[in-house]
Image (spheres, rainbow, N blue to C red):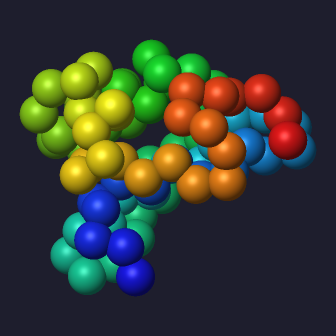
């Protein structure tokens, strides 16, 4: 299990990436992001401070199954 609270999952076949946050002992789906802006909005709604800078911090965000900031279909 990862200790990083935010996970950006691999790109989906139709584009976009599922975003989850681990809190209260479980993973919660924040939504399907299609851009860095979408990701920042999800993080802001989840109460993450400074979401625009957090997305590049590996202590906060783990990018799985693809390079960071790539949103195209798999």
Q: Residue 32's quadrant in the figure?
A: top right
Quarter of the figure with the C terminus: top right
Residue lying furthest left in this view?
A: 49
Q: Residue at x 62, y 38 (%)?
A: 67
Q: Residue at x 20, y 75 (%)?
A: 24
Does residue 57 appear in this view? yes
Q: Residue at x 68, y 28 (%)?
A: 71
Where residue 62 appears, as percent x and y from the top left, is 42, 52
Left or right relative to 1: residue 50: left
Quarter of the figure with the N terminus: bottom left
Where residue 70 appears, as percent x and y from the top left, is 65, 28
Left or right relative to 53: residue 1: right
Where residue 37 appears, as percent x and y from the top left, is 45, 17
Does residue 45 appear in this view? no
Q: Is residue 33 above or below residue 60?
A: above
Q: Residue at x 27, y 71 (%)?
A: 3
**Nearer-the-camera pick, 30 or 68:** 68
Q: Residue 11's quadrant in the figure?
A: top right
Q: Is residue 70 above or below residue 14?
A: above
Disc tally is: 0
Q: Residue 41's quadrant in the figure?
A: top left
């Amino acid at each position: 299990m990862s200790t990083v609270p935010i996970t950006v999952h691999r790109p989906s076949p139709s584009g976009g990436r599922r975003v989850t946050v681990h809190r209260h002992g479980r993973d919660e789906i924040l939504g399907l992001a299609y851009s860095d802006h979408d990701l920042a909005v999800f993080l802001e709604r989840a109460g993450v401070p400074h979401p625009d800078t957090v997305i590049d911090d590996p202590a906060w965000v783990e990018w799985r199954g693809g390079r960071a900031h790539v949103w195209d279909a798999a």
